[in-house]
Image (cartoon, rainbow, N blue to C red):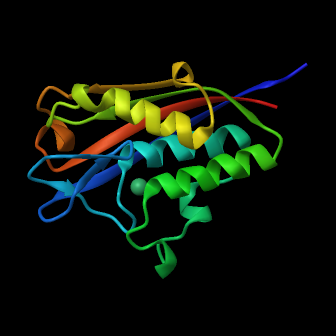
Amino acid sequence: MSTPRIGYGYDVHRLTKDRPLLLGGVEIPFEFGLAGHSDADVLLHALMDALLGAAALGDIGYLFPDSDAGYKGISSRILLRKVAAEVEENGFSVGNVDVTLVAQRPKIAPYIWQMRGNIAVDLNVSIDKVSVKATTEEGMGFTGSGEGMAAHAVAMLFQ
Ligand code: MG
């Protein structure tokens, strides 16, 4: 019998000028992008930490240290595929994942299907196992002011 394992991930990145905005592997037209060592895809970062958490395999800061120049500017989809491989090699399969982006702007509804597709491909699961949602914090806090974006994720694995 397979044993279910749950994991949770959370990430924050600061918004800045002169960076592309990548969320769920989709480049979204916006006047700001997210600052970070990699492509700063906050949504995929939270997801990776949820997957690693469920497998008790550490976190992305441990696997992909930002002191490593090899990860500078790297696509988070490449990192997500590495995490998926790590999870699989350790005897886990993905049940489902659910990610919530917290951002005041822009509207991401038009891009959600593409994000789900990207994640499904990278995790090698069907798209119905991948949920991506978005919410605002009603203008409050650092996401409300547009200082940054946050993402929360949960992942269910089976061992
Ligand atoms: Mg991050």
Is 144 situated left or right of 123 in this image?
A: left
User: Does 151 appear above or below 90?
Assistant: above
Q: Tell me the residue at 43%/60% (across/down).
A: 75
Q: Quadrant of the N terminus?
A: top right
Q: Tell me the residue at 29%/27% (across/down).
A: 134
* Ligand 1 shown in quarter: bottom left
Q: Tell me the residue at 11%/62% (across/down).
A: 17
How many discs mark residues in the rendered view? 0
Residue that protrudes farthest toward the right in the picture? 1
Is 18 situated left or right of 121 in this image?
A: left
Q: Quadrant of residue 73?
A: bottom left
State the residue in front, 103 or 123: 123
Q: Tell me the residue at 43%/66% (across/down).
A: 74
- Residue 106: give x, y in percent of width and height: 14, 36
Residue 68 visible in the shown view: no
- Residue 48: give x, y in percent of width and height: 54, 46
Is 149 situated left or right of 95 in this image?
A: left
User: Does 54 appear above or below 32?
Assistant: above
- Residue 38: give x, y in percent of width and height: 40, 65
Residue 121 visible in the shown view: yes
- Residue 12: give x, y in percent of width and height: 34, 49
Q: Quadrant of the C terminus?
A: top right
Q: Quadrant of residue 94?
A: top right
